[in-house]
Amino acid sequence: MSSTNPDDFQEKRRYERIQKSFVMRYRVLPGNDINFKQPLRDGSLCDIGGGGLRFLADQDVKKNDQLVIELEFSGWCVDGKEWISTGQASDHGRLTVLGRVMWVSASALDQVLIEVGVLFIGSVQRGPK
C-alpha cells in the first residue's frame, strides 16, 4: 500500500466538503477497462464535496487507481438528470461516478482500515434494466 499523509498536502480544494457518514460501494477498474462485472466492495464515506470524496476501505487501494463509485441518497429520487428531494426515507436516488484515487493513508480512526481520497472524473448514466 502506498501511504501518503493527507495533512502534508497544501489545501487545493475548490469545493467545501460536507461531513457525511454512510456505506458506499465501489469497484477498482482493471487498467482503463470500465468493467461493471467486477465485484462491488463496501466502503464507509467520511465526507463529500463537489470535486471528490474521502472514504474508509478495508482492502488495498492504490494511488491513481480508477474507481466506479455508487452512492445512494435516502430521501431523494432521480428524474432524468434532475435530482428531487422527496423527504421520504423509502426513496433512494443512486449516483454512479468515476473517480481517481489521489491519496491513500493509514486511518487514524481504525488501524485495520485505510483512508482514501478520490477526485471525481466523470459520472455514469445507465438506461433502465
Image (tube, rainbow, N blue to C red):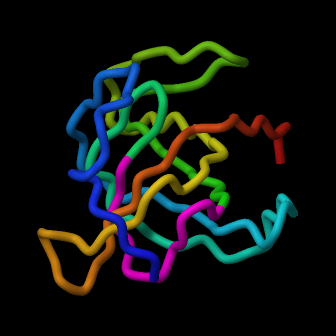
Relative image position of residue 7 (x, y in whole percent): 21, 51
Relative image position of residue 72 (x, y in whole percent): 47, 44
**Count of residue discs:** 0
Residue 12: quadrant of the picture: top left
Q: Residue at x 38, y 72 (%)?
A: 57
Q: Does residue 69 appear left or right of residue 2 in this picture?
A: right
Q: Residue at x 22, y 71 (%)?
A: 107
Instruction: Please tell me whether residue 56 belongs to the stretch shown in magenta.
Output: yes
Relative image position of residue 1 (x, y in whole percent): 45, 83
Q: Residue at x 25, y 52 (%)?
A: 8
Q: Which residues are magenta?
A: 54-65
Residue 106 higher or lower than 9, as above or below? below
Residue 109 higher or lower than 70, as above or below? below
Residue 34 higher or lower than 109, as above or below? above
- Residue placed furthest toward the left: 109
Q: Does residue 93 appear left or right of residue 121 in this picture?
A: left
Relative image position of residue 40 (x, y in whole percent): 60, 71
Q: Main secondary structure of the magenta part?
A: loop
Instruction: Please tell me whether residue 31 belongs to the stretch shown in magenta.
Output: no
Q: Nearer the viewer, residue 112 or 44?
A: 112
Q: Nearer the viewer, residue 35 or 85?
A: 35
Q: Does residue 42 appear left or right of residue 88 in this picture?
A: right
Residue 75 higher or lower than 104, as above or below? above
Q: Does residue 86 appear left or right of residue 87 in this picture?
A: right
Q: Residue at x 28, y 78 (%)?
A: 113
